[in-house]
Image: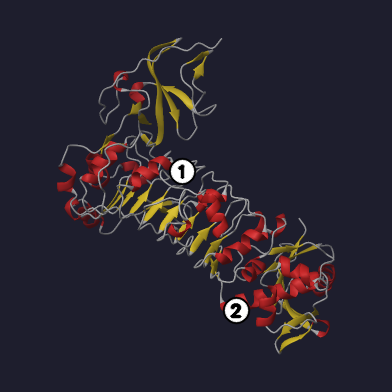
Amino acid sequence: MMQNPSSNSSLSSSTPEQADSHEFRIGQRVHASGDSRRIGTVKYVGPVQGYSGKWVGVDWDNGEGKHDGSINGIRYFQANGEKSGSFVRPQNLTTGISLLDALELRYRGSSTKEEEDEMYVLSASKKRVSVHLLGKDKIQDKLSRFEEMTSASLSYLGVRSCGAPCQISSILPNLKELDLTGNLLSEWKVVCDICEQLPALAALNLSNNFLVHEIIRLPLLKNIRVLVLNNTSINWTQVETLQQSLPAIEELHLMGNKLREIMPTSSFYVQGFDSLRLLNLEDNCIAEWDEILKLSQLRSLEQLHLNKNSLKHVFYPDNDTIHELLNDNEPLEKCYKPFQNLRCLLLGGNTIEDLDSIDSLNSFPKLMDIRLSENPIADPGRGGVPRFVLIARLAKVEILNGSEVSPRERKDSEIRYVRLVLSKLHKNPEEIKRLHPRFAELKYFHGIEDERPSIGAAGPQKMASGLLSITLKCVGASIGEKPLLTKKLPATTTVGKVKILCESFFKLKSIKPRLFLQEEGSALPTLLEDEMASLMDLGIGNESTILIDEES
C-alpha cells in the first residue's frame, strides 16, 4: 500500500540566494538555481526514505520531472503529471528576489562572458565572428536611468515581492509599462502593492505567474489600461472581482486559463468593463456559444479573440433568445443591441462545421474582421468550403483569416459562388433559397443570367459557349522548371481532363500529376481531387491559376 508521510514545512522569508529547507513552504513558487525559466511549485518539504538530509518536492510547470510525487512505493505529494515531480536539494532552488533587485539585475548588471560569447554571426566558412554593439555603453547608460524609464521588462527573473516599501514610486516615477511574465508571484497582495507604488502604470503583464490566492484588499487602479493574465490559473469569479478595481481597463488578456464558463455575479450578462475594447479568451475550454453571449452587453467591446476553444456553433441572438436567456430576471428593454460595436471576431481553431454559423455572422452590426481558419467548415479537406465561398456568404467581411479582402477578390468570389450554386442546384430554386441566403441578392447584383453564365473579359456570357483563361504552373520537384502556360478551357472541363491535358502540355510521361487551385488571400492552395468535377462545378473562374504537383 502507498504510504503518505506527514509534510514538514514552515513559514519564513526567503532570500535571493539558495535557501535552506526551513525557508520553504507548501504552495511556494520556486525556480531552479541557475535557470529562472525552470519554475515549479513546492509540494513537499522534508525527508525522503532511503536518502539522507532534507528534500523539497517540486511540481514543475513544464512537466519535466522524474515522477508523480511518489518514490519506492511512498507518496510524498501528488504532482499534476506522471513525470512532472521531482525531489531537489534546497541549495539547488531559488525562492526569488524583489522587483527592485530584478531591475538592478536586468538594467544595471554587467553582461556575463557566456552572454557575450552568444553574440556572434557565422562567416562563410562557418566560423563564429563576435558581434560588438556600437553605442552599447550609451544605451546601457540610458536604460540605467530609472527615473526616466517608461517601460521595463523583468520577465523570468524570479520576482516574488516588490521590495522595500515606498521605494518603487521614487525610483520609477514615470513607468507606464511593466512586463513581469514568468516570475514567482503568487499573491494578489504583492501585485497590488506594486501597482499602488507605480502611479503612471498603464500596462501590466503578469502572464505565467500562478496567482492562485483569493483577491482581497484590491485598491482602485484607475490608470491601468492593459492587463495581461495569460496562463495564471485565474477564474471568472476573480475576473469579476478585478473589474471593480479597473475602471479604465481597455484590453484584458486571459489566454490559457482553462476557462469553461463565464459566470457573472449579479446578472446573466457580464456588466461593468465600460471601457473594455479587447477581450482575449484564446486557448481556453469554452464549448457553448451561450457562454459567449454573456459578453454581448459590453458596449465598448470591439475585438473578441476566441481562437483555440471548443466552440461548435455560433449564432446571433434575436429577442426571443435574449428573453429566454434572461429567464425573466431582467426586463428586455434594459438590454442593448448584442455586440453592438464588435468589429473583430477571431474563431480560429474551434470545431465549427455548419454554414448556419457562417451566415449568422452577417447579423453582427459592425463585424468586418473574422478568423475561421482551422475549423472544419473552412477546410475543404474536411468537408468545408473554400475561401471564395466564405467571402461570398459573409457580406461585410473586409479581413478574412488575417488577409484583406480586396474589392476585386470580393467580386470574383461572389460571381464564382453564384456559378457554383447554379451548377449544383439549378433545378431546385427552393433548395437554393434555403441553403444559400445571399444567392438571389448576388445573382441580381452581378447581373448573372439563369442560363448559368460564365464571366469573361467581355462580361457575362452563356456557360455553354464560355471559355475560361487558366494559367498552369508546374511546382513538382521531379517535373523540373517549366514556363507558365495559359490556356482557354471550357468551363465544363473536368479535373480529370485537365490532368490529361497537363500530361500532354508538359510531357509528363512517368509522373502522375496532382492539381491545386491557387486562390488570392489563401495561405495554402486547394487540392482538386474529384476528377469528375468540372471547373464550373468547383466555381473556378476566369484568370485562375492551377498548380501542377506530383503524386507523392
**Residue 436, above or below 327:** below
What amino acid is labelled 1 in the image?
A: Met
Percent from the top left, x then y, of residue 394?
60, 68
The residue positioned farthest toward the bottom in the image shown:
458
Percent from the top left, x then y, of residue 55?
39, 18
Question: Disc 1 designates what residue?
Answer: 263
Name the front one of labels 2 and 1: 1
Q: SS at mark 1?
A: loop
Residue 283 visible in the snapshot: yes
- Taking the image as shown, residue 47 lies to the left or right of residue 478, namely left
Say which mark, if any, is on residue 537.
none
At label 1, counting other C-alpha atoms closer than 10 Å, the crowd grade (few under 14, some 14-19, many 20 or more) is some
Question: Disc 2 designates what residue?
Answer: 408
Q: Nearer the viewer, residue 184 or 353?
A: 353
Percent from the top left, x then y, of residue 178?
29, 49
Quarter of the figure with residue 422: bottom right
As measured in the structure, the alpha-carbon distance from the residue carrying label 2 to the one carrying label 1 is 44 Å
Residue 537 visible in the snapshot: no
Q: Quadrant of the N terminus?
A: top right
Quarter of the figure with residue 408: bottom right
Q: Nearer the viewer, residue 247 or 229?
A: 247
At label 2, counting other C-alpha atoms closer than 10 Å, the crowd grade (few under 14, some 14-19, many 20 or more) is few
Q: Quadrant of the C terminus?
A: bottom right
What amino acid is labelled 2 in the image?
A: Arg
Name the N-terminal-most of marks 2 and 1. Answer: 1
